[in-house]
Image (cartoon, rainbow, N blue to C red):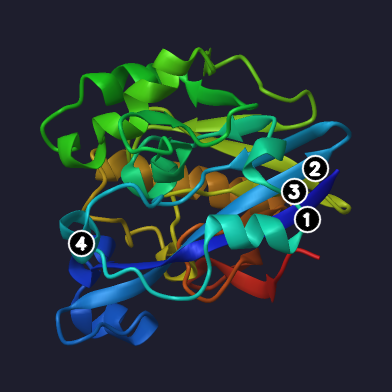
Amino acid sequence: MKLYTIETGKFKLDGGAMFGVVPKTIWNKLNPADDNNLISLAMRCLLIEDGNRLILIDNGIGNKQDDKFFGHYYLHGDDSLEKSLAKYGFHYDDITDMVLTHLHFDHCGGSIKWNNDRTKYETAFKNATYWIAEKHWEEAIAPNPREKASFIKENILPIQESGQLKLLKNNEKFHNEIDLLFTIGHTNNMMHPVIPYKNTKLIYLADVIPTVAHIPTAYVMGYDVRPLESMKEKTNILNLAVENNYLLYFEHDPTNQMCSVHQTEKGIRAKEFLIIE
């Protein structure tokens, strides 16, 4: 099993929203904001090559929305999904499995693209099965008012229409060697693959711990629908990582791909920063 980091570009979100009740005087030292109170965040995905399967976890924000939409998020950097795949000799059509941790637009926007004459949407990965947690899918197609703006219908419904959608129940897996954790604090039934890597495993965190700065228990995003559950789930994941020497893989940290963790006097904290090799 070979792993590749896939950088799809950076965007900006409100720093206060990203850190919830944590004061700016604290979080601004960890991820400094610009004059508009916005902080830079990665949209970092993960590619797994295993025999004849090429599995992509999440796919970034995509490029099909209009300028007004992208104007809210200040896309920057030179990375893109297409360029990152090409860096390792791969193309969209090579992807056999498209695994979506959840259906917020910055994680699944690359799932769907315009057709050649821009008359309709189609799947970007025409040869892939799209794996999504069943309970999360149900939430995304009938969203609650708090999350409605994050579930964009053109990112979601064309997957079902394509016939490529595969819904996973909580006791099912998309790969025999990859375990799945599910969390409900950020959004209902977000999926976290736990993937063999070298002599250990890495946990794909998605939005349960979006950056290294969010490791402390109380550092929970204002976007989370159930912040108290997020705190419990973070604690469970961090304990799991310490007990088993697992690595944490960050989707949104602007600098750090991955780290090990250890117990300190202040709680569990990052120990060593690593990159996929």
Q: CA distance from mark 4 to mark 3?
A: 32 Å
* Type of the residue with mark 2: Glu
Counting labels gives 4
Pair 4/1: label in front: 1
* Type of the residue with mark 1: Gly
* Type of the residue with mark 3: Asn
Q: Secondary structure at mark 2?
A: strand
Of labels 4 and 3, earlier in sequence is: 4
Contact (Cβ within 8 Å) of mark 4 with mark 1 = no
- Residue placed at 52% from the left, 62% from the top? 80
Q: CA distance from mark 2 to mark 3?
A: 24 Å
Left or right, 15 with reference to 238: left
Pair 1/2: label in front: 1
Q: Which residue is mark 1?
A: 89
Q: CA distance from mark 1 to mark 2?
A: 12 Å
Q: Which numbered dot is residue 17?
A: 4
Q: Which residue is mark 2?
A: 49
Left or right, 202 with reference to 66: right
Of labels 3 and 1, earlier in sequence is: 1
Would residue 6 be seen by someone viewing this image from the given angle? no
Pair 2/3: label in front: 2
Q: Which residue is mark 3?
A: 244
Contact (Cβ within 8 Å) of mark 4 with mark 3 = no
* Type of the residue with mark 4: Ala
Q: Is residue 17 above or below residue 76?
A: above
- Residue placed at 42% from the left, 41% from the top? 108
Q: Position of residue 114 (x, y in %)?
A: 38, 38
